[in-house]
């Protein structure tokens, strides 16, 4: 992503990076003339959405992707008002550089052909943005709240669909908002307490503080079972090494996020806990049999789905016993559709892990990767190293018939239903003063004390 000097900084950051952190993709410079979607969402859908208050959104979600019943049909009406280009744009969740929606950045200019984060959103109409400290997005609570507000306002111009803003806030070693929010224990520390109430409370506190900043989706909890002590990428990010103990922790965390009216993401499907290779820099191979996968890796994801998790993130890992093709799970129809959709019954949004990671880029080019991810069953395409190239590849695949427009509609509807459930069609509200409240600090102190 960044230029060479920033890439050095990011390489060091990978030592404590989350799996949706990206690796600093190289060779991603793009032409300012690259194509971008033209907005077409009807003003009727936007007007209907403005009446839906975030405060009345159901606190829990259905894993079938349903709208929760409070304003059913809003997502469908928004989809009906979109043209193909806007639909394709909704699949992408991207990085923007800079601390303010209106602040110019050379990185944005080089990658997107426009200078400011708001202009990136206005030009490309992405479904989502993910915030990072290394992208200059995080310096203060008021600053983050103003940035998210500006980005969401930019997305709504000309009747555009609302923007989901996410972050990797797992707590522990992966904390993108470390300096701003209540310091909370990571998953391993929570797991050590043996109390699922702690997982729920920590997730609720995290979600409440994210929502106060205008962030509507957390790429957490980690649902991996960390059975390999040499695992270089999961380790203490997991709740533990026993699926019978990890699964209820994951379910409780999903409940906590939903209590805060924030979307949650169970990651990394079908399981990243038994690896000795970091998928940021290589392609891990896990030789679990189908039987072992069902008893070891699958239970936390089953539980997350039972608790209505909004999103499941794929892993850039190869499981030859689950799919002998040699493709990573992110590109595997057998895994994303056959196991996650059909066997586990997940009807929500499937997100890829970051598409700038080496684990998914080894076998195919960046254009082919996004097409194969959609064909495999992915809905949300996270952090493509070259957004205009990836966008054009999906558009071309639809126009050629390789991907049907109905398949695109399925993904966009799931994404819009998530946004409807989490109140993103409603008023834009932030409350940065709500961070580090006495109640939140008490939760942190209690769980830290129990984890010792």
Image: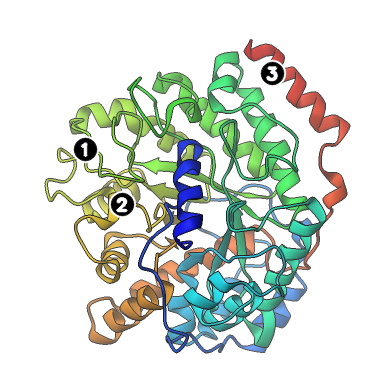
Corner quadrant of residue 224: top left
Q: Say the numbered circle drawn on residue 358.
A: 2
Query: Which numbered disc, 3 or 1, marks the residue that appears first in the sequence?
Result: 1
Q: Nearer the viewer, mark 3 or mark 2?
A: 2
Q: Secondary structure at mark 1?
A: loop
Mark-to-mark CA distance, 1 and 2: 14 Å
In-image side of 358 versus 180 (left or right):
left
Residue at image position (58%, 20%) is: 189
Q: Nearer the viewer, residue 68 or 325?
A: 325
Q: Nearer the viewer, residue 410 or 223?
A: 223
Q: Is residue 18 visible?
A: no
* Residue 84 picture location, percent across and down: 43, 85
Count of labels in the image: 3
Q: Is residue 190 above or below residue 390?
A: above
* Residue 106 picture location, percent across and down: 57, 73
Residues at discs 3 and 2 in contact (Cβ within 8 Å): no
* Residue 439 picture location, percent across and down: 84, 30
Quickly name the residue at label 1. 285
Label 2 neighbourhood size at 10 Å, few (<14), some (14-19), many (20+)?
A: some
Residues at discs 3 and 1 in contact (Cβ within 8 Å): no
Q: Secondary structure at mark 3?
A: helix
Quickly name the residue at label 3. 448
Q: Secondary structure at mark 2?
A: helix
């Amino acid at each position: 992503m960044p230029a060479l000097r920033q890439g050095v900084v990011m390489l060091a950051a990978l030592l404590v990076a989350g799996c949706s952190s990206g690796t600093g993709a190289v060779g991603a410079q793009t032409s300012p003339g690259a194509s971008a979607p033209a907005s077409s969402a009807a003003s009727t859908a936007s007007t209907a959405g403005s009446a839906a208050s975030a405060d009345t959104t159901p606190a829990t979600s259905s894993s079938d992707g349903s709208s929760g019943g409070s304003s059913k049909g809003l997502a469908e009406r928004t989809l009906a008002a979109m043209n193909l280009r806007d639909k394709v744009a909704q699949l992408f969740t991207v990085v923007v550089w800079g601390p303010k929606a209106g602040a110019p950045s050379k990185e944005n200019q080089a990658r997107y052909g426009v200078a400011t984060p708001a202009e990136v959103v206005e030009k490309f109409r992405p479904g989502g943005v993910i915030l990072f400290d290394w992208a200059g997005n995080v310096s203060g609570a008021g600053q983050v709240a103003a940035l998210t507000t500006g980005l969401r306002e930019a997305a709504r111009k000309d009747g555009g669909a609302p923007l989901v803003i996410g972050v990797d806030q797992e707590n522990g070693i992966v904390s993108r908002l470390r300096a701003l929010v209540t310091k909370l224990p990571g998953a391993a520390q929570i797991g050590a307490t043996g109390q699922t109430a702690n997982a729920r409370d920590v997730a609720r506190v995290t979600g409440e503080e994210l929502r106060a900043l205008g962030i509507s989706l957390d790429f957490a909890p980690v649902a991996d079972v960390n059975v390999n002590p040499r695992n270089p990428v999961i380790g203490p990010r997991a709740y533990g090494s026993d699926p019978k103990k990890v699964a209820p922790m994951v379910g409780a965390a999903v409940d906590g996020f939903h209590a805060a009216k924030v979307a949650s993401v169970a990651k990394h499907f079908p399981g990243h806990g038994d690896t000795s290779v970091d998928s940021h820099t290589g392609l891990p191979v896990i030789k679990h049999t189908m039987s072992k996968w069902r008893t070891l890796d699958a239970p936390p994801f089953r539980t997350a789905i039972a608790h209505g998790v909004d999103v499941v993130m794929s892993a850039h890992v190869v499981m030859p016993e689950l799919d002998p093709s040699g493709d990573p799970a992110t590109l595997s129809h057998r895994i994303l559709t056959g196991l996650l959709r059909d066997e586990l019954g997940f009807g929500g949004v499937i997100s890829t892990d970051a598409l700038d990671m080496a684990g998914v880029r080894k076998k195919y080019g960046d254009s082919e990767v996004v097409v194969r991810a959609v064909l495999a069953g992915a809905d949300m395409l996270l952090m493509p190293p070259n957004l205009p190239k990836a966008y054009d590849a999906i558009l071309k695949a639809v126009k050629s018939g390789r991907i049907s427009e109905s398949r695109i509609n399925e993904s966009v509807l799931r994404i819009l239903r998530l946004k409807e459930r989490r109140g993103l069609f409603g008023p834009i509200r932030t409350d940065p003063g709500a961070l580090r409240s006495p109640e939140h600090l008490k939760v942190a102190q209690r769980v830290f004390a129990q984890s010792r």
